Amino acid sequence: MEINFLVMLIIIPLVVSIINFILPRNLQKLFTLAGIGYSIYIVYILYTQKAESASFFGSIILSVDKLGLLTLSFIQLLSFIILIFSLKGLDKEIEREYFILYPLTVAFCNGVILSINSISFMIFWGLSGLTLYLLGLLGKTSDTPKTIKKTFILIGGSDAFLIMGFVLLAYLNPTINWSLNNSQLPLNSLSAYISFFFLLIAAFTKAGGFPFHTWVPDFSKDAPVESAAFLPASLDKFLGIFLLAKIVTGYFNIDFSINLIIISLGALTVITAVMMAMNQHNGKKLLGYHAVSQVGYMIMGVGSGNVLAFAGGLFHMINHTIYKSCLFLSFGSVEKKTGTSELDDLGGLGKKMPVTFTCSLIAAFSISGIPPFNGFFSKWMIYQGLFNQVKEISSLEKILLLICIILALFGSALTLASFMKFIHAVYLGKRISTFDKITEAPFNQLFSNSILAFLCISFGLLSLQIPLSIFIYPALTEMNLIIPDFIGLYNPTLILFLFGIAFIVGISFFLFSPKIRYDNVYLGGSLPEEKFRIAGTEFYNEIRNMKPLKSIYDWADKKYFDLYEVGTKGTFKLSDLFQKAHPGQLQLYLLYVVAGLLIFLLLI
Amino acid sequence: MIIPYFIIIPLLAAFLITLIAGEKDDWAIILSIIAVISLLILSLFSYITMHTETLSYYMSSWKIPVGIVLVQDALTSFMLVLVSIISLTSLIFSISYVRNLSGDWKYYSLFMLLVAGMNGVIITGDLFNLFVFVEISIFAAYALVAYGGKAEEFEASFKYAVMGSVSSTIVLLGIAVTYSATSTLTLAKIGEQLPSINSSIKLWIGGLFVAGFGLKAAAMPFHAWLPDAHSSAPAPISAMLSGILIKILGMYVLVRIFFNIFDAPQFFLNIFLIIGSISMIAGVFLAVGQWDFKRLLAYHSISQMGYIFLGFGLSTTLGILGGVFHLLNHALFKSLLFYNAGAVETVTGTRDLRKLGNLTRIIPTTSNTSMIASLAISGIPPFNGFFSKLIIIIAAIEANQPVYALIAVIGSILTLASFMKVQRYGFRSEKKADVNGKSIDWKMNFAMITLAVLCVATSLMIIPGIREIALDPVVDVLQNRTLYIQLVMGK
């Protein structure tokens, strides 16, 4: 029998996971590494030769297009890098389960991307949510049970919407017989709208878009850091944005007003999440909020209906997974060394962990959109695309779109601000004496962080040559989208050159300026106490306490904006109401029966 | 002819236990296990070999309409297999569990009567005979609910008995009307006569049956007895009641009467849809606020029965398939969940979720199997509940009833929420749980693992090749409507 590579891409990680049940730990690691390495090789083969689609039960189940191939490549790549990070330093108690679940997750995510049949898509989508839940359960903080419950209610609940959306889609398109080729269904009936928005809910929840994002920050805080970098920061982004891209370009044919709704939701995601991120005291939660906020840009780009912004959105998806996993993982190294993820307790670790610090800094520059790092380039493409769009629409839509763009720009600035705080609180400032014996992270962690940081730089400098022309443009060409010529002003080499000059000038000022004296800090003649240390978490308290924002923040603290919390409260209220109707009195119950019978007989 | 043995074996076992077991509980256990295993073998044998055949057996060779006829077709065999599987695991679970109560032979005798009654209901082709079997099993159930002997259990049993009698009265009234209209009690014969009788009388009969058997199926608004009865009974009995009793006495009878005899009139299908969706939503809202583990499960039985009603009410091939499949799946995972609750109660002495803690280390088998069951009932792939719910949702949309599909989706999300609550507080909480030193022995674990494996294995029934053998014959029986009458009447 001929080997079908698409099937192999699911089977191999699956088999690795099953065999890992019986292998001893070290072999588990090697075996997983080999398995995921092999799937990278398969993806490479898929680039060189045309993939045969796979059929089961008489219909085509697995197939891959260029967009899928792009997503698959980065799923394998990120899984491989994060796997290297996980090889050493994982909590011994959870190692066994972790290495069983890890390849399983990869298999299911590959399954989602490869599915061209909506039934198998739903199954793999649900399964990937299940492994997210199981990986989250490995967390050890006291909030883990609560967080994981919330996560899975949101994720599993969105699965139900996905099912409904796909079933309606198949019903409206009886000819396609559950296949997911680009049906371009026009939104002309209520069912079509419901189907569209339900699928959108599923994509938003998975990727972490407003208002279904609330599980991401909590999950990031309470799950093991490896799984936070692996799922909400990387793989779930791929799945969610992949689905979003399919919805807006393939399954449905939408007009610009719908695009505008998606763009506004994206802008809201950007701004709300970044505002929340600024005030976090927990490093992982802060990163989690940024993982949400960055999704906003992807949603804006992919959902905009403009080719350039669409390409930018896809590029941002790739970039985001790279720098966000770098941030998570490097912070993970810090957490493993210091035993805490609270920013108040950290500080001054840059000298002790220089490589980790550098990687973290590069990733922070990337996420803040500083040229020439990769994050800048994709945001730049999104903005350009959106501005191009502005020219072609009515004035009311124009205003709304401009507001969205401004919010997104503002979000970028706040991201930078927030990462100033993060970098300061973890790596700069004064070190607490208990951390004096801290050493640099193990080699495997440094290795994967450096690769990610290297990708941040190279994807920024060579964005046109590598990611865009190898991965993204082919996908666009296949979708019959024409790539506009846009790069008028921006040239990475030139920017690098200018930045380099500025850097050299700065260094020379530093070196040739009059003597700098280093001394201990004194306060009233005595050494300062701990309470005078600037931890950095208080940087933006002014914003927190500003007039209109204060009450909004207070409401956010009371979880008024958390769809899950609001939903829970509402459900319990209704439940109480029903409960009151069931006090355990037999007479009442008999009355129900009589009433029911009477209604039947009256109906007859 | 093996048909009558499905009644004879459990009935005989029940009497033998009282006769020869006496004070010796071990004999009672051995006897009942032998009986149930032979039932399982017989039912599996007939399920596998029969396919689409329909067999009739005339008791003492008296012909219709004088004698009583027993009928076995694919639907019957399917239900018999289900009863045997759940009874067997329930018995195995009981062996150590019931000793914790006041362990004795009476329990096993009553248990066998319960099984005899259910098998009788499934297999009989006579309306009054069906009523008698319903009463046999439900009387055994009253006694078993009160088996623990505490005040709360007596109260639950009393309520159950009152409500049960009300439903029996309604059913009896329905039978009386039927008899006066058709002059026969054989189901097939009634079906023959029906087209010729007054349509308003037909509606009356239907209305009384929906109310009477709907009460036994715990459909809203006839559901209120269920949470008390099912949460107070010993865990293996709760599993029997929630897992199969409400389905056999309620759902199976309704489906048999309305599809095969009444030819599925649209009016009653609409009633099925409406009470199905009310049960689905109200049941799950009631469940999600519960803190008593078993009460929460009991309310979910109402909600899940709603799905089954919905599937059958759609009456398309896909809808019936979904209903039948969900009926099987619900029996499996709900029974498993009741065993889990029983095991937790054995170890911690409480059913209050708030008082439980992290049990994953203390009773790993129970926590893992409960995870499987929770995911299955919430409709998470790859477990069986996902597929049956999916079929029902697809069926609802293809039948152009998207509102019901939406209700099913909402119900499914809330189900997930309440089972996440069970997992979070009951098994994986950050607290340490108080345990009383009792342990879960291998017999209980065996029962739980068996059902957990089945929860995964039955998902395979969705694969086309297997589905054609396992589920399609059952669906055909209901889809072919009144073909049943012709087959039984031998035409």
Image (cartoon, rainbow, N blue to C red):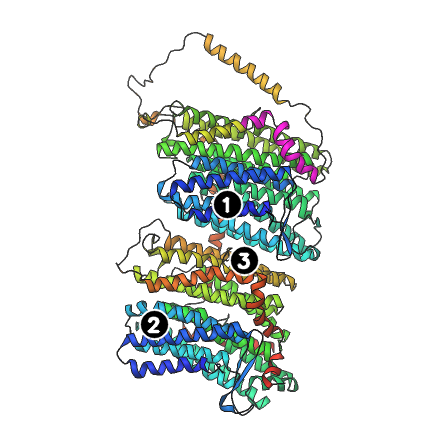
| B188 is higher (above) or lower (below) than A512 | below
Closer to us: A515 or B337: B337
Q: Which mark is residue A13?
A: 1
In this rendering, the label closer to the viewer, 1 or 2: 1
Q: Quadrant of the C terminus of chain B?
A: bottom right
Dominant secondary structure (helix, strand or loop) of the stretch shown in magenta: helix
Closer to us: B285 or A396: B285
Can you identify the residue that label 2 sits on? B153
Q: Which residues are magenta?
A: A456-485
* Residue B103 falls left or right of residue A491: left
Closer to us: B326 or B365: B365
Q: Tag 3, which chain?
A: B
Q: Report x, y in % for residue A151.
A: 47, 47
**Residues at badges 1 and 3 in contact (C-beta under 8 Å)?**
no
Can you identify the residue that label 3 sits on? B410
Query: Which residue is found at the position 57% from the left and 24% from the top?
Result: A372
Q: Do the residues at pointers 1 and 3 share their chain?
A: no
| A500 is higher (above) or lower (below) than B137 | above
**Disc 1 secondary structure class:** helix
Q: Report x, y in % for residue A394.
A: 73, 38
Neighbor class of circle 3 (other Cα within 10 Å; few <14, some 14-19, many 20+) is some
Closer to us: A485 or A78: A78
Q: Do the residues at pointers 3 and 2 share their chain?
A: yes
